[in-house]
Image (cartoon, helix red, strand yellow):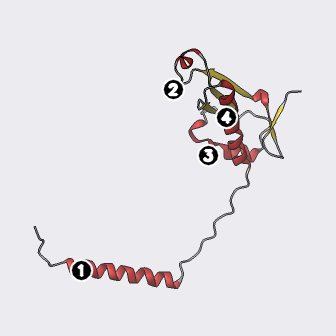
Amino acid sequence: MPPFIPVTRSFAIDADEIVENFVRASGPGGQNVNKVATAVDLRFDVANSPNLPERVRERLPAIAGRRLTNDGVVVIRADRFRTQEQNRADALERLLAMLREAALPPPPPRKATKPTLGSKIRRLEGKKKRGAVKSLRRGRPSVD
């Protein structure tokens, strides 16, 4: 039985669905950067995952944004840390955070409201005041 990674109380993902590729990281690190592949490219196939609830599968593309490929695969690049293990944990936590956000219930629909009478009056008074200021500027010769 493959190990499962809990995302929320209601669902978990199979650890075998996550593919990790290790590449060399850019940035500071001295000779270590040139020798050791510490950065992680984590891939998770959203489109073909049997463990994702349908509402998570529908909401995830909006949350993932550019990290989602045309094939429905989320790609997360982690190279913040200097060790491979820390980068693996970082990438996995970022994926789980994305999945948890997609699992949240959608926000309630916005109820349309009308502006109050007082706010309408204040708006019109402000417009009259501004118009009066501008009308006073008309007819004056410009000062060079």
Q: CA distance from mark 3 to mark 2?
A: 33 Å
Above or below residue 97? Residue 38 is above
Quadrant of residue 125 in the image? bottom left
Element at label 2? loop
Work out whether 28 lies above or below 109: above
* Residue drawn where x is 74% and y is 48% of the image: 103
Give the mark toward the camera: 2 or 1.
2
Q: Earlier in the sequence, mark 3 or mark 1?
A: 3
| 2 or 4: mark nearer the eye | 2
Q: Give the spatial CA distance, label 2 vs label 1.
A: 61 Å
Residue 105 x, y percent position in the rendering: 73, 55
Q: How far, Cα to Cα, is label 3 from label 1?
A: 48 Å
Disc 4 packing (10 Å; few <14; some 14–19; many ≥20)? some
Mark 1 or mark 4, whichever is nearer to me: 4
Closest to the observer, 58 or 128: 128
Disc 1 residue type (three-letter): Ser
Q: Residue at x 27, y 79 (%)?
A: 133
Instruction: Determine the CA span between mark 2 and mark 4.
Output: 18 Å
Residue carrying label 2: 28
Q: Circle 4 sits on which residue?
A: 90
Asked if one can make out residue 98 in the rendered structure from this viewpoint, the answer is yes
Residue on which disc 3 sits? 62
Say the numbered circle drawn on residue 135: 1
Residues at discs 2 and 1 in contact (Cβ within 8 Å): no
Task: Identify the amino acid type marked 2.
Answer: Pro
Q: In front: mark 3 or mark 4?
A: 4
Q: Are marks 1 and 4 in contact (CB under 8 Å)?
A: no
